[in-house]
Image (tube, grey):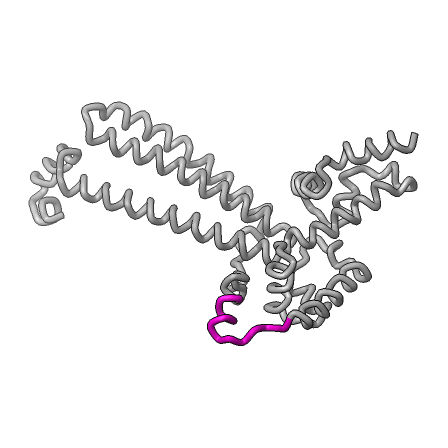
């Protein structure tokens, strides 16, 4: 801004006194707002892709971490929207409204900051990067089609599927709350790439849903067990590999059409 940096002190003071009418300041605000809009769009796009990768490769707390990061990005979007309104009113006939919005932002800033720090301190794994080697299944399939190097024949997939199901039933790896597709790969001796295609493409399930299906089936067995009638729902969800009551209830209802409590009550009423 040459009209500010290349003039004497008196001219600088005059420039600042009428800053809201200066073209340089207005252009500067427009460019900053455009930059933030692109940043937020990019952030949501990255979160969307990361969620797909997590669903295809993880079955633990990582999903909850992504949900929180989405909430935080939404909070930043709201904060920016208010800031944008403040800047718009700043260059209109209502600068007073801009002042009040500025005060609102100053009050909102520490709330976001403390919320962010609280989550970070209590959940240090929140900001762990997604494994850069992981790819979306559709990208893997596309690469195979381009190279005409199919990972396995249908017969091989069927054999691998039998191995996978046997391993899930006998070893019960789903009881591990932080289970990943790499863990399963190590157990069944099938490369992660092939296992990912097998579950996400051939079975038409995300790894997250695939693992939760076994967890819910096991939870249903525990709820049917009369010797465990005194065991609480909370104890059961932790026992079968979940680490969140909300995710357990959502997965249970998706699988059975009922909540865990109503499912147990129906079992009790049918035995009377």
Residue 150 versus residue 134: which sits nearer the camera? 150
Q: Residue at x 10, y 49 (%)?
A: 2
Q: Residue at x 87, y 36 (%)?
A: 230
**Relative side of 228 to 162, left or right:** right
Q: Is residue 212 above or below residue 90?
A: below
Queried whether the magenta region covers residue 164, the answer comes back as no
Q: Residue at x 75, y 37 (%)?
A: 260
Residue 120 versus residue 130: which sits nearer the camera? 130
The quadrant the C terminus occupies is: top right
Q: Residue at x 25, y 32 (%)?
A: 88
Queried whether the magenta region covers residue 145, the answer comes back as yes
Displayed quadrant of residue 150: bottom right
Q: Is residue 97 above or below residue 258?
A: above
**Relative side of 74 to 30, left or right:** right
Q: Is residue 260 above or below residue 69?
A: above
Where are the magenta residues, as a range? Answer: 141-153
Q: How many marks are shown on the rendered structure?
A: 0
Q: Position of residue 172 (x, y in %)?
A: 78, 58
Residue 39 versus residue 128: which sits nearer the camera? 39
**Relative side of 169 to 13, left or right:** right
Q: Position of residue 47 (x, y in %)?
A: 48, 50
Q: Position of residue 106 (x, y in %)?
A: 37, 32
Q: Position of residue 45 (x, y in %)?
A: 43, 51
């Amino acid at each position: 801004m040459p009209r500010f940096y290349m003039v004497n002190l008196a001219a600088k003071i005059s420039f600042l006194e009428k800053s809201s009418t200066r073209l340089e300041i207005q252009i500067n605000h427009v460019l900053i707002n455009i930059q933030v809009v692109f940043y937020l769009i990019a952030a949501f796009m990255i979160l969307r892709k990361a969620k797909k990768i997590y669903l295809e490769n993880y079955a633990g707390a990582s999903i909850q971490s992504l949900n929180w990061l989405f909430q935080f990005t939404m909070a930043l979007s709201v904060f920016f929207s208010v800031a944008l309104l403040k800047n718009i009113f700043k260059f209109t006939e209502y600068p007073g409204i801009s002042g009040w919005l500025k005060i609102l932002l100053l009050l909102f800033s520490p709330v976001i900051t403390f919320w962010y720090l609280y989550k970070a301190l209590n959940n240090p794994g929140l900001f762990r990067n997604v494994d850069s080697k992981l790819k979306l299944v559709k990208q893997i399939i596309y690469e195979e089609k381009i190279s005409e190097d199919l990972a396995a024949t249908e017969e091989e997939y069927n054999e691998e599927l039998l191995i996978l199901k046997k391993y899930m039933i006998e070893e019960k790896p789903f009881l591990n709350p932080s289970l990943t597709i790499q863990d399963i790969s190590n157990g069944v001796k099938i490369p992660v790439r092939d296992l990912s295609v097998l579950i996400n493409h051939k079975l038409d399930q995300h790894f997250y849903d695939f693992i939760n299906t076994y967890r819910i089936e096991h939870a249903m067995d525990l709820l049917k067990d009369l010797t465990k009638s005194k065991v609480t729902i909370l104890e059961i969800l932790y026992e079968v590999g979940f680490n969140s009551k909300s995710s357990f209830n959502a997965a249970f209802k998706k699988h059975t059409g009922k909540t865990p409590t109503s499912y147990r009550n129906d079992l009790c009423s049918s035995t009377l």
